[in-house]
Protein backbone atom coordinates (compact mmCIF):
# COMPACT_ATOMS: atom_id res chain seq x y z
CA UNK A 1 0.00 0.00 0.00
CA UNK A 2 1.35 3.43 -0.90
CA UNK A 3 1.57 6.45 1.36
CA UNK A 4 -1.62 8.47 1.74
CA UNK A 5 -1.85 11.58 -0.40
CA UNK A 6 -1.75 15.00 1.18
CA UNK A 7 -5.43 15.48 0.31
CA UNK A 8 -6.45 12.26 2.07
CA UNK A 9 -4.36 13.18 5.12
CA UNK A 10 -5.97 16.65 5.26
CA UNK A 11 -9.40 15.05 5.01
CA UNK A 12 -8.50 12.79 7.95
CA UNK A 13 -7.37 15.83 9.96
CA UNK A 14 -10.66 17.58 9.11
CA UNK A 15 -12.55 14.47 10.27
CA UNK A 16 -10.76 14.56 13.61
CA UNK A 17 -11.53 18.25 14.03
CA UNK A 18 -15.19 17.68 13.14
CA UNK A 19 -15.36 14.91 15.73
CA UNK A 20 -13.74 17.02 18.44
CA UNK A 21 -15.91 20.06 17.66
CA UNK A 22 -18.98 17.83 17.55
CA UNK A 23 -18.32 16.46 21.03
CA UNK A 24 -17.65 19.95 22.40
CA UNK A 25 -20.78 21.36 20.74
CA UNK A 26 -22.89 18.46 22.03
CA UNK A 27 -21.68 19.05 25.57
CA UNK A 28 -22.41 22.77 25.36
CA UNK A 29 -25.81 22.17 23.77
CA UNK A 30 -26.82 19.68 26.46
CA UNK A 31 -25.94 22.10 29.25
CA UNK A 32 -27.48 25.13 27.55
CA UNK A 33 -30.52 23.36 26.10
CA UNK A 34 -29.68 24.80 22.67
CA UNK A 35 -31.38 23.06 19.73
CA UNK A 36 -29.36 24.79 16.99
CA UNK A 37 -26.06 23.87 18.59
CA UNK A 38 -27.31 20.32 19.17
CA UNK A 39 -28.16 19.96 15.48
CA UNK A 40 -24.74 21.33 14.52
CA UNK A 41 -23.11 18.82 16.88
CA UNK A 42 -25.11 15.95 15.38
CA UNK A 43 -24.08 16.91 11.85
CA UNK A 44 -20.42 17.22 12.83
CA UNK A 45 -20.44 13.86 14.61
CA UNK A 46 -22.36 12.16 11.79
CA UNK A 47 -20.00 13.35 9.08
CA UNK A 48 -16.69 12.78 10.91
CA UNK A 49 -16.64 8.99 10.28
CA UNK A 50 -17.78 9.54 6.70
CA UNK A 51 -14.80 11.83 6.13
CA UNK A 52 -12.52 9.20 7.66
CA UNK A 53 -13.87 6.57 5.28
CA UNK A 54 -13.47 8.83 2.26
CA UNK A 55 -9.92 9.72 3.30
CA UNK A 56 -9.09 6.01 3.48
CA UNK A 57 -10.56 5.35 0.04
CA UNK A 58 -8.17 8.01 -1.26
CA UNK A 59 -9.60 8.04 -4.78
CA UNK A 60 -9.93 11.34 -6.60
CA UNK A 61 -13.72 11.16 -6.48
CA UNK A 62 -13.78 10.18 -2.79
CA UNK A 63 -11.47 13.07 -1.90
CA UNK A 64 -13.61 15.45 -3.96
CA UNK A 65 -16.76 14.15 -2.25
CA UNK A 66 -15.12 14.65 1.14
CA UNK A 67 -14.09 18.18 0.24
CA UNK A 68 -17.60 19.12 -0.87
CA UNK A 69 -19.08 17.50 2.24
CA UNK A 70 -16.63 19.40 4.42
CA UNK A 71 -17.46 22.78 2.86
CA UNK A 72 -21.19 22.06 3.14
CA UNK A 73 -20.74 20.95 6.74
CA UNK A 74 -18.77 24.06 7.65
CA UNK A 75 -21.46 26.28 6.17
CA UNK A 76 -24.43 24.40 7.60
CA UNK A 77 -23.15 23.53 11.06
CA UNK A 78 -21.12 26.73 11.22
CA UNK A 79 -24.22 28.82 10.58
CA UNK A 80 -26.21 27.00 13.26
CA UNK A 81 -23.34 27.35 15.72
CA UNK A 82 -22.95 31.05 14.90
CA UNK A 83 -26.65 31.62 15.49
CA UNK A 84 -26.31 29.91 18.85
CA UNK A 85 -22.98 31.25 20.06
CA UNK A 86 -22.75 34.63 18.32
CA UNK A 87 -26.41 35.55 18.06
CA UNK A 88 -26.51 35.78 14.27
CA UNK A 89 -25.99 33.94 11.01
CA UNK A 90 -22.60 33.58 9.30
CA UNK A 91 -24.13 35.31 6.27
CA UNK A 92 -27.52 35.22 4.54
CA UNK A 93 -28.36 31.76 3.17
CA UNK A 94 -25.29 30.10 4.71
CA UNK A 95 -27.30 27.18 6.13
CA UNK A 96 -29.29 26.48 2.94
CA UNK A 97 -26.13 26.71 0.83
CA UNK A 98 -24.38 24.36 3.24
CA UNK A 99 -27.31 21.95 3.16
CA UNK A 100 -27.26 21.97 -0.63
CA UNK A 101 -23.51 21.35 -0.52
CA UNK A 102 -24.08 18.37 1.77
CA UNK A 103 -26.59 16.91 -0.67
CA UNK A 104 -24.15 17.36 -3.56
CA UNK A 105 -21.36 15.85 -1.45
CA UNK A 106 -23.44 12.76 -0.71
CA UNK A 107 -24.25 12.39 -4.41
CA UNK A 108 -20.51 12.55 -5.09
CA UNK A 109 -20.10 9.71 -2.57
CA UNK A 110 -22.49 7.71 -4.75
CA UNK A 111 -20.41 8.61 -7.80
CA UNK A 112 -17.23 7.58 -5.98
CA UNK A 113 -18.79 4.18 -5.43
CA UNK A 114 -19.77 3.89 -9.08
CA UNK A 115 -16.42 5.08 -10.44
CA UNK A 116 -14.50 2.57 -8.36
CA UNK A 117 -11.31 2.30 -6.39
CA UNK A 118 -8.62 3.85 -8.59
CA UNK A 119 -6.34 5.63 -6.12
CA UNK A 120 -5.54 9.33 -6.34
CA UNK A 121 -1.76 8.90 -6.04
Image (tube, helix red, strand yellow):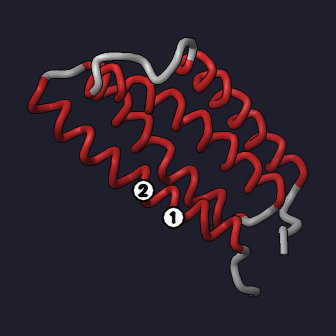
Which quadrant of the figure contains the C terminus? bottom right
Callouts 2 and 1 close, C-beta under 8 Å: yes
Hey, which quadrant is residue 77 in on the image? top left
Q: Residue at x 84, y 70 (%)?
A: 119
Q: Which residue is mark 2?
A: 17
Where's residue 39, x and y in %? 35, 26
User: In this rendering, would 65 be left or right of 34?
Assistant: right
Hey, which quadrant is residue 31 in on the image? top left
Seen from the viewer's position, the closer of residues 94 and 4 is 94
Label 2 sits on a secondary structure element that is helix
Which quadrant of the figure contains the N terminus? bottom right
Label 1 sits on a secondary structure element that is helix
Q: Which residue is mark 1?
A: 13
Please say if 117 is above or below 61. Answer: below
Q: Residue at x 66, y 57 (%)?
A: 54
User: In this rendering, would 65 be left or right of 40?
Assistant: right
Where's residue 110, x and y in %? 77, 40
Please say if 95 is above or below 70. Answer: above
Q: Residue at x 69, y 41 (%)?
A: 68
Where's residue 102, x and y in %? 63, 31
Where's residue 4, x and y in %? 69, 78
Distance (Cα) linking label 2 and label 1: 6 Å
User: In this rendering, would 105 be left or right of 73?
Assistant: right
Amino acid sequence: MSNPTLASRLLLVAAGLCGALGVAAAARASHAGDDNLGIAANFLLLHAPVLIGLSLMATRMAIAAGGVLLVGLLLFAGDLAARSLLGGALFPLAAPLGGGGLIVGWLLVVLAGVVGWRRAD
